[in-house]
Image (spheres, rainbow, N blue to C red):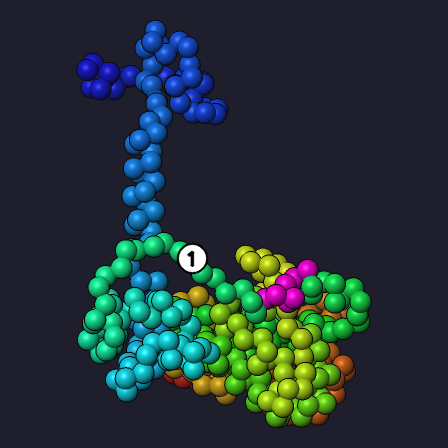
Amino acid sequence: MCNVYCNDFHREICVKLIKPPYVCNPCTKQFGCSLVKQYYNAVTADKEYRSILLTSRTGVSLSEEEIAHLDGIISPLIMKQQSPHHIYVNNRDSIMISERTMYRLIDGCLLAARNIDLPRKVRFSARKKVLSVKVDRACRVGRDYECFTAFLADNPDTPVTELDTVEGKKGGTVLLTVHFTKAEFMLAFLRDHNDSQSVIDIFERLYLELRPDRFADIFLLCLADNGSEFSNPNAIEFDKQGNRRTRLYYCDPSSPFQKGSAEKNHQFIRCFFPKGKDMSGYSQSDISLMMDHINSYGRKSLSDKCPYDMFAFLYGIEVLNLLGCNKIPPNDVTLNRSLFRKETEHEI
């Protein structure tokens, strides 16, 4: 044990452990070697892997705010003797979880409703657990990024509108951003929850405010990510009479660079709302004021013009008035939270 207590001892590492397979198992000189050895044991490695796999799937991946939002929708309907399946089918745009996850939340006593409130479940015996993964990708059939590039190849002059979500506090209020790539002009809308219905409501409102002809000229082609808030493309693409008003396509999974123009513009929003910042204390008028300052900020990529001027040149000042957008004088542009009066008073 002298090496343990000797301060002058320096451990020598075999050069074979620095390169694959990083273990001594295949070495033919291991029995005569006096250096510290490292072996691979398949049984031990498998146990460690399964332990990590089990731990990663333990618990609930929802915040307290998201659970409270779901509880306010699901529990009152269950108390009316509605089944979880009936609730899920008729509130799919407001519930951002699967039907199976709904049952798990009830079974885990995370909602006000309990298993005893489900008349049929108390009569069932426990089933043998079957691991299965069900992913509904039907909404993306014919709307993936390959279809998007093919459409642009056939219609190269079509302006693209990129849709995305900016989160502050996990599970809290979020922003829907609508970015017009040609003008680098962005709109932002405050939403209480990151669900599909809130996105649909915003598109319905824009459709009514701009009128169908203007809306169709501006929102010719939309590109969104794979978030659940964009999982009802038909409600976005068509109005209530079944008339097409836009086309919606999706980026490839884990490929935010495919809508890089919107991602780059989000850096201005992060000057006001860093990640983790709670947005619940702000109103839509605060968000609109913030976007007025961002859109009035000159860009080198626009020959030192601001996005507001470029959008007015492409679509007319009347559209900006309908959207409630205003231009801020260049010397008055502010790109930090001191813009909000309430934030300034709080810091003082």
Q: Which residues are magenta?
A: 140-146
Sort mark 1 into few (<14), some (14-19) or many (20+) by Cα contacts within 10 Å: few
In the structure shown, which secondary structural element does the residue marked by tag 1 occupy? loop
Is 87 on the left or on the right of 259, as rendered? left
Residue at point 31%, 69% (across, down): 103
Q: How many marks?
A: 1
Answer above or below: position of 97 versus 6.
below
Residue 142 in which image quadrant: bottom right
User: Does the stretch in magenta take in 144?
Assistant: yes
Q: Nearer the viewer, residue 194 or 173?
A: 194
Residue at point 71%, 88% (across, down): 214
Q: Position of residue 44 (x, y in %)?
A: 30, 32
User: According to the image, label 1 marks what residue?
Assistant: 133
Say whether residue 93 is visible: yes
Q: Nearer the viewer, residue 188 or 48?
A: 48
What is the residue that sits farthest to the top in this orientation? 32
**Which kind of residue does numbered mark 1 sit on?**
Val
Residue at point 40%, 77% (across, down): 88
Q: Position of residue 85 (x, y in %)?
A: 37, 76
User: Does the stretch in magenta take in 12?
Assistant: no
Residue 120 in which image quadrant: bottom left
Q: Quadrant of the C terminus?
A: bottom left
